[in-house]
Image: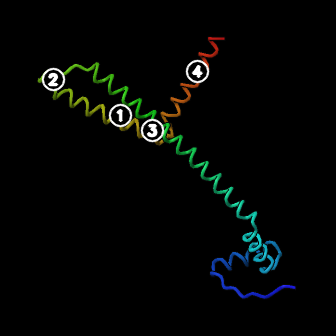
Amino acid sequence: MKGRLNCYFDAALLKRLDELAARRGLSKSTIVEAALASFLSPDAVDQREAAITRRLDKMTRAIERLERDVSIGNEAQALYIRAWLTATPPLPEGAQAAAQAKARERYDSFVEALGRRLAKGQRFSREIAEDFKSSVEATSHESE
């Protein structure tokens, strides 16, 4: 024996329920009953928890990749700055204005090249990873 229950739904949700019932050829009561049974089932809680856990794991892996990429970028920049500071002698007073103008020109070229790479979807971190993988494979083949 089935009991009767009157429920009120948001208009948009009710429209979706009507569409689903028409598409599947089922009564709205059957769909709502199945949804409620699924919601109240202990298995439903486990399924939701598993889905949330999978999503959190995926997000954790993405954050770890971001941390790795930022770390690689920071280290590469630090190495470059150290090498540049070590190898670049100070300029005499008369050459500073010309050097600053050349530096602005080079910086503008750098920004344009960076914009082109980003527009194409190229990523330096991906290139580094590929170069590293290639060098590891080459080293392992040489040692065989």
Query: Splitting the image into 4 quarters, where does residue 108 fall?
Result: top left
Judging depth in this view, the residue of 131 and 75 nearest the camera is: 75
The label number, if any, that marks residue 76 in the structure image? none
Locate residue 120 relative to residue 80 in the image: left or right. right
Estimate how packed mark 1 is, as few (under 14), some (14 to 19) or many (20 or more) residues with alpha carbons within 10 Å. Answer: few
Judge from the rendering whether residue 82 lies leftward or rightward of residue 42; answer left or right.
left
* Amino acid tagged 3: Val
Lower position in the chain sequence, tag 3 or tag 4: 3
Precedes in sequence: disc 1 or disc 2? 2
Q: Callout 1: helix, strand or loop?
A: helix
Marks 3,4: beta carbons within 8 A: no
The single residue placed furthest to the top in the displayed view is 143
Q: Where residue 95 appears, x then y in whole percent? A: 15, 23
Q: Count all numbered tags in the image, as a single digit.
A: 4
Relative to 121, is 96 on the left or the right?
A: left
Name the residue: 50% across, 42% down. 66
Kind of residue at disc 2: Ala
Gap between marks 2 and 3, in whole Å?
A: 36 Å
SS type, badge 2: helix
| 68 or 96, nearer to the observer | 68
Residue 95 is marked as: 2
Q: Looking at the picture, which amino acid does disc 1 mark?
A: Phe
SS at badge 4: helix
C-alpha separation, residue under disc 1 versus residue under disc 3: 20 Å
Quadrant, the N terminus? bottom right
Which residue corresponds to the image point at 58% horizontal and 22% vertical from the top-left? 134
Question: Which residue carries the number 1 mark?
Answer: 110
In the rendered image, which residue does mark 3 sit on? 70
Residue 131 image position (x, y, % from top left): 54, 25
Determine which residue is flagged by label 4.
136
CB atoms of marks 4 and 2 within 8 Å: no
